[in-house]
Amino acid sequence: MKTSGWIFWIKILAGIALLIVLYNKIDSRESVLKAFAKLSPSYILLCFALFISNIGLAFLRWRYLLKRRFPDLPDWDIFGSLMFGYSLGLLTPGSLGEMGRGLFFADRDRVAITGLNVLDKLACQIVLMSIGWSSIMIMMADGTLMGEFTA
């Protein structure tokens, strides 16, 4: 069987596993629609806007990295790779499955793509740590962080 056949079945199994996990996490005593009805529409719109911008920025970052190494890659394949990695990441501890973005490409150097993925994740962690440490320092200087622990 070709590798693309295996990848297709891995995608199907990953989708089924995700549905099973989601089904088990939902409280069966309350309807999902009732839970959404309790939410403020402005919160739902804000979440949707942040979700779209997050996916868009991740796509642009991933596209930049892949186009540097593989200039002829179509944007649709890059987006598919990103979504495939996110899907695998939902099923694995610590989103380790996101390292599988290279599995999406059958005709490319998967080791190089995995290396670019590590670089992408490293850049995200550097930004996250920089903002986190800056926030902690501001809160410590302001006294708000220490006030939480002494109360």
Image (tube, rainbow, N blue to C red):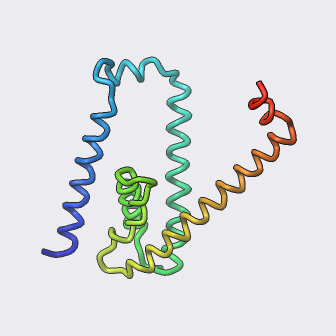
**Would you say 73 lies left or right of 104 here?**
right
Q: Please state which of residues 92 and 61 is positioned toward the viewer in this rendering.
A: 92
* Quarter residue 21 falls in: top left
Name above or below for residue 125 compared with residue 150.
below
Hey, which residue is sitting farthest left in the picture?
1
The structure residue drawn at horizontal position 27% and vertical position 53%, both measured from the top left corner, is 14
Name above or below for residue 126 compared with residue 140.
below
Q: Position of residue 138 (x, y in %)?
A: 82, 44
The structure residue drawn at horizontal position 32% and vertical position 20%, both measured from the top left corner, is 31
**Would you say 70 lies left or right of 139 here?**
left
Q: Position of residue 24 (x, y in %)?
A: 28, 34
Name above or below for residue 36 compared with residue 93.
above
**Would you say 19 lies left or right of 95 here?**
left
The structure residue drawn at horizontal position 78% and vertical position 28%, both measured from the top left corner, is 150
The structure residue drawn at horizontal position 52% and vertical position 32%, both measured from the top left corner, is 45
Give the quarter of the figure containing the N terminus.
bottom left
Q: Position of residue 74 (x, y in %)?
A: 40, 71
Q: Where is residue 43 in the image (x, y as percent from the top left)?
A: 54, 28
Name above or below for residue 4 compared with residue 11.
below
Total residue callouts: 0
